Amino acid sequence: MSNDPLLQPYKINNLTLRNRIIMTAHEPAYPEDGMPKGRYRAYHVERAKGGVAMTMTAGSAAVSKDSPPVFNNLLVYKDEVVPWMKDLTDAVHEHGAAIMIQLTHLGRRTRWDKGNWLPVVSPSHHREAAHRAFPKKMEDWDIERIIKDYADAAERMKAGGMDGIELQAYGHLMDQFWSPLTNELDGPYGGSLDNRLRFTFDVLGEIRKRVGPDFIVGMRYTGDELLENGLTREDGLEISRRLKESGMVDFLNVVRGHIDTDAGLTDTIPIQGMQNNPHLDFAGEIRAATDFPVFHAAKISDVATARHAITSGKVDLVGMTRAHMTDPHIVRKIIDKREDEIRPCVGANYCLDRIYQGGSAYCIHNAATGREETMPHEIAQAEGRKKVVIVGAGPGGLEAARVAGERGHEVVVFEAANQPGGQIRLTAQSERRREMISIIDWRMTQCERLGVRFQFNTYAEIEEIEAETPDVVVIATGGLPHTEVLSEGNEHLISAWDIISGDVKPGKNVLVYDDAGDHAGLQAAEIIAKTGARVEIMTPDRAFAPEVMAMNLVPYMRTLQKLDTAFTVTYRLQAVEKTGTGLKAHIGSDYGGVAQQREFDQIIVNHGVVPMDDLYFDLKPGSSNQGEISHDQLLAGQPQSVQRNSEGSYQLFRIGDAVSARNTHAAIYDALRLMKDI
């Protein structure tokens, strides 16, 4: 048996887990009709195959009809969920992992216009800022009904074969009872801490009546809200002791903070550029004070930190949840002494942010996550060996090279720059986005292991490509900033890339005109504002930077607001003219009736990229497929067989921004789903 502390078994109640690494409860929004069907099952089974001790489903499965999920989630108030749960639990158990589920009533953390349009309920009328619903103040019959709903749901989960359940408190209904900021009830459920905890213990009591003493029941909660007049650290320690002393819970899963605002949520679940494992020491304090099983997860993204968490006794089980979205085989790689091959979580939070905006979670640089039914996490060898030439060593090109290498092909990559990375290397120049470079570093390490040949400082032309006598050519050349966006005066514009790269010095009175809405506009604005310049960010959209999404927006806002940056929405920059003192911006609006002129000394534009596709079109006549991709074959996972030119000597494909301006995930997904069948 290994002496690695992470690989030691752990017993909780009557369940023995095979190691100390778990995935804590999370909802990637993969249910279908509120049920854990094929896609949901495949996602969790892949992590079980990868060796995780336990996977915990459903960040907040809904126990009541008046707790409608604000994004796709499991509806455990329905009896029909039981057979689907049984299929899921059997499949996970088959691969040696345990499986639990998190149950909750969201209280005010939802919207009244979701689900069945029932009133949102809470122990007060206070609206949660994040979801904006004004709740109904709960009545006695609401409390009685929801207690029964919790117990009914727990009983369903036991019938479905779950190893246990976790009740979610922080930010949800239970915590809304606990916190003096959100509980304004009189009588037995409001006022003193004893009364504010009564709802939780009534729920636990009813659940234990239904599931008995051997079924695992735990609690995920905040031990310190970090809010004025909210739950304090001392309250958290007292609540922890009471949960243990109740005899009705088997573990404590503790965090710190509050999630009623985007900023609060981001501090609780940090993203890239923020401190790693910020609440681990606090979890250790709870563990020391209670001498009771404690789980914890919050930006524990690397094995070394996880090992320290266990070795130091801060926690009994360590959650590496987002890390397992990036690499589902972490534990197997630890066992096989291949830790250096673990795909690193870069904290980009594309997974969490995208749930609200895109409808389901994806990892920014593992395109197989959430697509396990169609995309492989491990690449199969091809039947025959081909020569694959790739032009461009950005994230898409490197993914194409990696996958082709795993397939067993001979791979050559041409790159005009002296190092790989493309736009990733540009964005990683910002301190907060530095972790993004791991997307490139990991792929370079894998490509070197697979024998991929790189030619840097090579601006490939058709002659260099054809000299390699390729069977397949992939154009991953990306794009260049698009600044031709005005009716006149485009020559006076500077791209956001020019500022981020340092090629252009920031002005003193600057307009950042951003209608792409991605990171580049805000990164440029932040660099300029830090020089002491006056900065205004303008967009024709209803909101600025929509592609950055909620949690990633938080650090930008904290910096830009402190630097007195102005934010202007729904105005369109139409033209720019040079004057004796600077630049005159002509500003209008898509809504009409606006014609303004404003003076700046510098105008930055962020409008996506124009594909660098000259080489693709040069190569097209010599290709067998004329660059065509069969969408039917691509989506069916079949090799590309388009023949448009019988004289062509190679297949030709374009991916990523060389096709059109999109994002890092799109480029990597392009590469994976094309190259896995080459």
Image: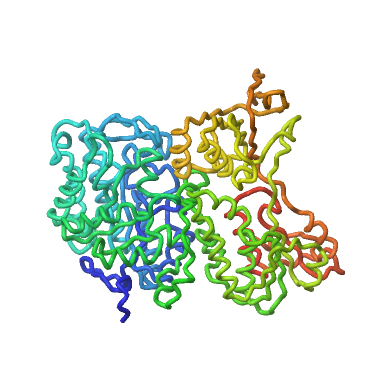
Give left or right: position of 630 versus 292.
right
Q: Residue 6 lies in what quarter of the image? A: bottom left
Q: Residue at x 62, y 61 (%)?
A: 420
Q: Residue at x 78, y 58 (%)?
A: 616
Residue 470 pos. (x, y %): 76, 72
Give left or right: position of 44 versus 99.
right
Of residues 491 and 71, which is closer to you in this image?
491
Is 658 above or below relative to 571? below
Of residues 676 and 299, which is closer to you in this image?
299
* Residue 32 visible, this orientation: no
Q: Residue 114 lies in what quarter of the image? A: top left
Residue 283 pos. (x, y %): 25, 55
Of residues 454 and 661, which is closer to you in this image?
454
Residue 77 pos. (x, y %): 33, 48
Residue 281 pos. (x, y %): 27, 55
Q: Residue at x 56, y 64 (%)?
A: 375
Give left or right: position of 210 versus 586.
left
Q: Residue 403 lies in what quarter of the image? A: bottom right
Of residues 22 and 92, which is closer to you in this image?
22
* Residue 128 visible, this orientation: yes
Is 93 above or below relative to 67? below
Is 636 above or below relative to 505? below
Give left or right: position of 510 versus 491.
left
Residue farthest toward the bottom in the current orientation of the protein: 1
Q: Residue at x 58, y 54 (%)?
A: 424
Quarter of the picture holding the N terminus: bottom left
